[in-house]
Amino acid sequence: MRLKGSYSWFDHVLRLGLGCAVVLFAARVWAVDAEKEKAADEAWQMSVDSYCADPQDESLSAGWKDFAQKYSEFPNAPRALYMAAETLFQQRFYDKASKAFADFLDRYPRETFSPSALYRRGECAYNQKDYQGALELWQNFLDKYPGNFLTPEALYGRVLCEILRTKWRDASSAIERWTSQYPHYRTEKKVRIPLGLVYFHNQQYAQALQYFQSVEGDMATFYVGRCQENLGKFLPAAASYKDVILKYPDSIYVLEAAYSKADSYYKGNNYSVAVKEFNSFVKSYPQAQNLPFALYKMGVCYLMQKDYTNGLNTFTSLLSQSERSPLTSYALYMKGECQRLLKQNSAAVTTYGEVLSEYPNSYVSGSAKFKMGWCLLQDGKSKEAVQTFREFLTVYPIHEDVQLATYLMGNSYFKQEQYGQAIPIYQSILMKYKYSDISDASLAALEMAFYIPKQYEQMISSTHYILRVLAANFPPSKSTWRSLSYFYLGEAYYHMELYPQAVSQYKKILDNFSDSPVLLWAKLGLAFSSFEIADFKTSRQMAQELAEDADTPAKLKTAGALLVAHSLFNSKKYEDAVAKYELFARQNPQAPEAGDAYFNAGQAYFQLEYYANAIDAWKKVITFYKKNEKAPEAAFLMGDTFFKAQKYEEAIGAFRLLEQWPEDVNPHRKEVDIRVAQCYYNAKQDDKAIAAYTHFVEKYPDDPKIKDAMEGIQLSYYRKGATADAVKPLMEFVAKFPRSRLATDALYRVGEIYYQEKNMEQTIATFQQLMADYPESSVLPNAQYYISVCYDGLGQKEKAVANYQAFIRNFPTHELANDIRFRLGTALFNLDKYEDAITVYQSIVDLAPKSDYAPNALFNIALCYKRLKRWNDAITAYTQYYKTFPQNPKAKDAIVAIATTYREEKRYASAIKIWQEMIENKDFADQKAELMYSIGDAYLEMEDKENACKALEGMRALQPKNDVYRLTALAKLGTVYEEMQKWGNAYSIYQDMSTSGAKPEWTQASKARMGVLKSDHGPEVDAFLKDGENEPEGAPGGTGKTK
């Protein structure tokens, strides 16, 4: 193969060639005539000598061809025809050579040199740059002659063809096929650059680098730099390009290496060096085709170094030198960027406008539109910015800055205080786009858009969940937006008085955002929120840090210092609090908060019972800080303190001070008269007190404190000994102000006075008047209650029942309804109306099963059934009581009542079963003797003497022995034994009774009976006593057992 062409890596590949020697002059056996053979040999030798003497002799090919025709029957004829083609090949007549090789193959398809001929045809196509034809011919060779000695060369030739066709993947496959069959070729020098090129163009830069580094030369060194650059090794790449420039100054790669050297520094963010290299390139190669790119990247380097002025000048120079192209659209855009960053917003808007008008379809047109809106916003032209961002979002819906543009459009509305327009825009960012720093910024802005117009509840409901999701899934970036979101959410919670939630938000800032701009404010918020939840230790700690930190703004220092004092006050450390309040007031006498400090110092003194000091502190508020909002309260507290100290004249003077502040800033203005009246009352000047109270009532008939005034009138009259006179002014008030909302209260108080005096008739009449005149009153149920109870108290049961029923009918859900129902049931019970009583009691059980009335109601239902002799229903009610209220004290009574009911109904077996269960229940341990006696007695009623004896006999082991139930049971048992003529058993029982420590009459009776039995039935008794097993427990030598 022969080298043709010039600058490119193609030429280098062509340089490599295939260069295979394929002509063989070996002898071959062939049967021919001897003389003709001799002539043929001589002719053959002559042709060989001519070829060796001058291979470029153009007549040689014809000579070889003549030999082949003349001596066609001789062995060298095929070889001569082959050499005719080979000579043309060596003389670079590739087209003729290819045809000659084709003729050879047509004539000798299976000759020794046929593989070489087909291979040479591929080389001819290759040297004629018919790479597709070469590929096909060599593939034909490989298919026909697999394993031929030229197979490696054919495979290698296919690699070169694919490279020269720039079919890199096919080249890679060809290399894999070649080297997998002949791996030793990988190490040959001639194939390293082709292999490197294939790997390079297949982006396998590490493998390519290995091949290029193993070869010396300008091209290899240049591509070493290329590989290093693509591997991100920018400094080594720059060094490689430098080697090309220094070692091969005449190389065709020098210009490209100079540019690439600067570009490597540029790509490695080494902008200061890149600027110098690009500047050198511009000066050295002023006519270079890539000069505009060098200028562009030099401008970018200046911009990245924040040297916006030089950047602006560079982009301006590029625009003046270059024709309109895609690059100039970028340069024009970057010019606008430099102007924007130099805060030349108006100029930047103009430049961005030029981008949009001159290059509307440029890749940077969208960015230009976006930055135009940005600059308008920065220039305070919010309306124009809104319009620009809206157009941007419409025209460039998939631009990378769509999310940021949406955010800035929201900000444009925000700056116009159009928060209602901004809010849905910020919300759309959070719902529509993937998470980024803009998400955090949008959330913070959304919170501010709610916070400024004080829409705290909407802010919390709209943002707290989003913030929680962001925190759980996306760690905060280095920006401060996340901390602002926590801060404003904390502020909203604080304003909503949700202090624990506020604490949580402020703590997140302190724990995770130490460099946040709102850190100190968050600390103050935490201090105040902790204060509100009575965590005074944390509150004081935070406030103290703010007050003592030199970097804390004055406003926060003031708040911190006062909060320290407040926390001490609320921690009941009043002396420390006083010291802090007074220190603050002395150090900041002109501060608006100084009045607050003196006011709070007064309260601390008051808690310490230093009343004189408290009054002095409050006087300072009134004297020096009269306009302070706490001044009226200070005057009031002075009066109140004098009042409690029983200095009523001084108190009146202090209360009169309240008259100097209008009602809109003085919540105690109306109280002046009533507090003065209270002073008169406590000074026992009752007439003046009544007059003052009456004046207040007439002046403020609808004021809530009129209740206190009326009570004051009452008390004044009471103390004058004229209780009835208290009713008179109250009734006069009702008559004078019948429509006052307090008229019903006055009438109600009159009714209560009558009730307290036990004047039931007047109580009834008064409350009936209240119900008739004020049917809409909220105290109507209470009036009805008093009427009902009074009738009940007067013994007028039927009227009481009627009023109880009226109450339940009119006020079925009132808090007194269950009390009334219970009273009604009891009244009906006392009237022997048991069925009606059951209905009422049952309504309590059904409507209020968990009320205090339900247990007694259910118990009373059972009593009603017993009165009606409905034993089964009574038992059911008692059973329900025990199961429903097992912990109630009456639960035991219910069980007893069940057994008693069975006994009264003569259902002894059922009663016995209940008593036996009660004996097993530890709750009835103290009633065991009684229960065992009842069982024995029930068996006797059933005339079952055997079981009766067993039950009563079991009581002999009970303690104490003198228990009345035990003794009664033994007496009855002795009688039963006598009836059964078990004289020994009876004697044993009486003997036990005689030694039980019972009362003398029991002991005497027992001994008397023992004497009778001994006298009348001595043998039987003696026989029984001889058997030790049958003597009673406790008797000398006995076991307590009987036959």
Image (spheres, rainbow, N blue to C red):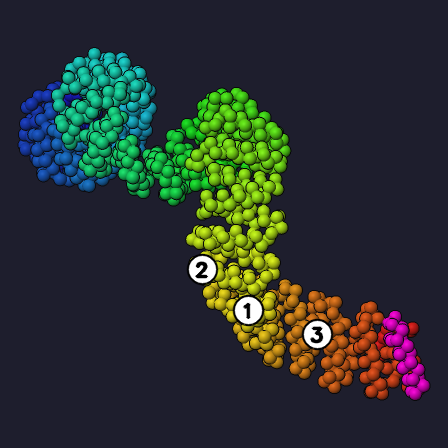
Residue 75, relative to residue 913: is it above or below?
Answer: above
Tag 2 and tag 1, C-beta contact below 8 Å:
no
Mark 2 or mark 1: whose residue is earlier in sequence:
2
Three-letter amino acid code at disc 2?
Answer: Asp
Task: Determine if residue 33 is in view.
Answer: no
Residue position marked by numbered label 2 in the rendering: 773
Residue position marked by numbered label 3 in the rendering: 916
Determine the residue positioned at 25% across, 25% down: 379
Q: Give the Cα separation between the discs numbered 2 and 1.
A: 22 Å
**Start-end of magenta stretch:** 993-1018
Determine the residue positioned at 55% across, 76% down: 835
Determine the residue positioned at 49% across, 43% down: 696
Residue position marked by numbered label 1 in the rendering: 800
Three-letter amino acid code at disc 1?
Answer: Ala
Discs 1/3, front = 1
Q: Is residue 387 left or right of residue 940?
A: left
